[in-house]
């Protein structure tokens, strides 16, 4: 391991890291962002109204689909719990998710690699979708956006990317030891971040709009489902050992 990549057992860097490029992102993450942008541009500018409707039917997630016999449906019941995470309803929605995907996806991809990252995306998207469906079973709500996956990335990052001395290290955070589910919450930065994050989603749940959107437009329950998946199950994807106690 190079000197600039060494960390101690408490998750603190033993040196001052060298200056890194501003847009130093893993290739897999760049390809993910390009795919999200391409799908949004296609839906927004290339498809007519009828085609957009079909696009949403075959790719967006809705709990209503699961009250009908699956044998009488096409493969959408199986694929939409993942494909919905690739769609976005507005440029603001897309930009917001890309911002957080960049921040929390970079350390995760560097830590677990491209293949595990893709599996993590698929399973966290499904977890977020069905957490939403469990609270709205049979409803005709339509769920789109990568927010559930981004929330899962946030939850996973809370287990390793926050140094004990505080802060969030997007560049070298992937090298820190994995903390236990309860141990991570002993990090004050993690505890404050998780508390504020859950409080914000609870405000959305009771109807208070945030960041300029109506609460009904924000799938707070998918956010929570994704976050719990990432936080509680991150160890299943992590190839590195946990912190020594």
Image (tube, rainbow, N blue to C red):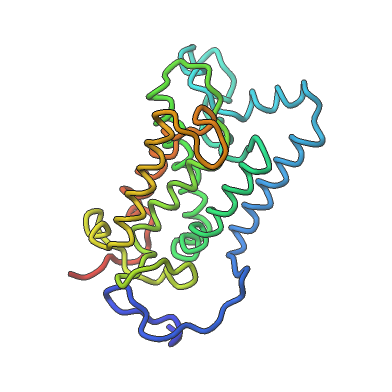
- Residue at 41%, 33% in the rendered image: 221
- Residue at 47%, 18% in the rendered image: 66
Q: Position of residue 204 (x, y in %)?
A: 43, 34
- Residue at 40%, 36% in the rendered image: 203
In front: 166, or 130?
166
The answer to whether residue 231 is above or below residue 22 is above
Q: Name which quarter of the figure residue 156 lies in.
A: bottom left
Q: Is residue 206 left or right of residue 53?
A: left
In front: 101, or 2?
101
In front: 196, or 124?
196
The answer to whether residue 95 is above or below residue 48 is below
The answer to whether residue 3 is above or below residue 115 is below
Q: Position of residue 134 (x, y in %)?
A: 38, 24
Q: Position of residue 64 (x, y in %)?
A: 50, 17
- Residue at 44%, 28% in the rendered image: 207
Q: Is residue 18 left or right of residue 93?
A: left
Q: Name which quarter of the figure residue 80 lies in.
A: top right
In front: 186, or 3?
186
Q: Name which quarter of the figure residue 245 lies in.
A: bottom left
Is the N terminus in the top left, top right, bottom left or bottom right quadrant?
bottom left
């Amino acid at each position: 391991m190079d000197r600039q990549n060494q960390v101690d057992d408490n998750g603190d860097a033993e040196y001052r890291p060298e200056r890194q490029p501003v847009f130093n992102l893993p290739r897999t993450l760049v390809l993910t962002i390009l795919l999200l942008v391409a799908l949004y541009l296609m839906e927004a500018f290339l498809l007519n109204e009828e085609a957009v409707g079909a696009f949403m039917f075959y790719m967006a997630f809705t709990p209503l689909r699961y009250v009908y016999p699956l044998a009488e449906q096409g493969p959408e019941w199986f694929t939409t719990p993942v494909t919905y995470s690739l769609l976005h309803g507005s440029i603001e929605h897309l930009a917001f998710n890309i911002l957080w995907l960049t921040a929390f996806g970079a350390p995760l991809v560097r830590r677990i690699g491209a293949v595990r990252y893709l599996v993590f995306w698929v399973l966290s998207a499904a977890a977020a979708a069905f957490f939403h469906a469990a609270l709205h079973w049979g409803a005709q709500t339509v769920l789109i956006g990568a927010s559930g996956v981004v929330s899962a990335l946030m939850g996973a990052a809370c287990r390793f990317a926050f140094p004990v001395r505080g802060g969030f290290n997007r560049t070298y955070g992937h090298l820190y030891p994995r903390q236990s589910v309860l141990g991570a919450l002993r990090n004050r930065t993690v505890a404050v971040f998780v508390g504020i994050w859950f409080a914000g989603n609870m405000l959305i749940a009771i109807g208070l709009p945030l960041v300029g959107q109506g609460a009904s437009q924000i799938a707070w329950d998918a956010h929570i489902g994704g976050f719990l998946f990432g936080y509680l199950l991150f160890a299943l994807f992590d190839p590195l050992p946990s912190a020594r106690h």
